[in-house]
Amino acid sequence: MRLARRLAALLGIVAVVASGCTHSSQSPPSNAGELPWRRVGEVVLTGGPARFDYTSLDPGRGLLFIAHMGVGELVEVDVHRHQVVRTIPDLPDVHGVIVVPDKHRVFATATGRNQLVALDEDSGAVLFTAPTGIYPDGLVYDPVRNAVWTTNEHAGTETVVDADTGDVRATVALGGEVGNVVYDPAADRMVVAVQARGELALIDPAGHTVSERIPTPGCASPHGQALDVAGQVMFVGCEANAAMVTVDLAHRAVTGHYKVGDTPDVLAYDAGAHRLYVAAESGWVSLFDRRDATTVAVGSTHLADGAHSLALDPDTHRSYVPIPKGPGGGPVLWEFEPTG
């Protein structure tokens, strides 16, 4: 993801092929084939055929926030009415986005300015900005301490920001370039993928200190993550070797290694359906099921160039994938529902 992001930052609006993420860029994963889902909707998006990054859904209100990184704006979509609500501009090189429904707030990383930006979910108005480290990317909300954590990829740090005031509470150094951060509510801890060291760092969110590190052998450059909270299993995307590994957090060990599309990026776990989605920079989407405490590969398919981000609705189990260049030449949001 890092190469494509840097290209996008330099070029602004880019075609997906500029990042080298095309169907022919890799041989298919061994479990390639049709996935148990079907496309049931499409929303035409704004902003032109530019790169998207992370997404975040408020399932109660049906509002999906999409980081349209290539044009520096957030796109807000009402997935119930299948229409764009608004676009929020002036977020240069926007990468991460999370919505916190209880606070009616949306938080985004304006990577081009090394900032966290807080927005009103109802109006889209900017509530505050806060400085971060170099190249803020993914982010997560800590509901216990009312804090937002941003992963500063190039700085190798986490910035901890008060979700109400924007005050920076702490900076946590990880010792090398980092991937994404996940909050584990069962153990009340942060888990950060440290790309440069090939490990997961466990952080005490109250003391802002690294309490332990878990090596991830067989996972070159761990980046994206998704957590099965009940099973205490972290799914980790390995950017540099087209793999996904499962990490048993209780026993501090890698328990499985699976082939996925080149440069896996966004991972999303549907706890109700016990299903994991892995979206890769190469446009491949892979599905896995958790059955009897094991991870089973369901299949992989090349969805579309640039289809590397995905949001899940935990209530309907539907998924939403922004596509930079749809059949009509412009950006679209595809909606899928599971089958079988």
Image: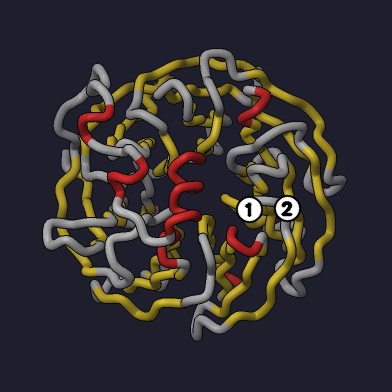
Q: Position of residue 106 (x, y in %)?
A: 55, 70
User: Mark 1 sits on what residue?
Assistant: 136
Name the secondary structure under disc 1. strand
Tell me the residue at 78%/47% (across/down): 205
Is the residue marked by circle 2 packed among few (<14), some (14-19), or many (20+) residues within 10 Å? many
Residue 208's place in the image compared with 127, above or below, is above
Residue 133's place in the image compared with 127, above or below, is above
Report, in whole angstroms, how far the alpha carbon at label 2 lies from the one at label 1.
6 Å
Q: Amino acid at mark 1?
A: Pro
**Residue 178 visible to the viewer:** yes
Residue 109's place in the image compared with 271, above or below, is below
Q: Amino acid at mark 2?
A: Gly
- Residue 116's image quarter? bottom right
Q: Position of residue 84 (x, y in %)?
A: 31, 76
Q: Position of residue 283 (x, y in %)?
A: 28, 39
- Residue 133 has which mark? 2
Q: Nearer the viewer, residue 239 or 260?
A: 239
Q: Position of residue 176 (x, y in %)?
A: 72, 32
Tell me the residue at 56%/80% (across/down): 120
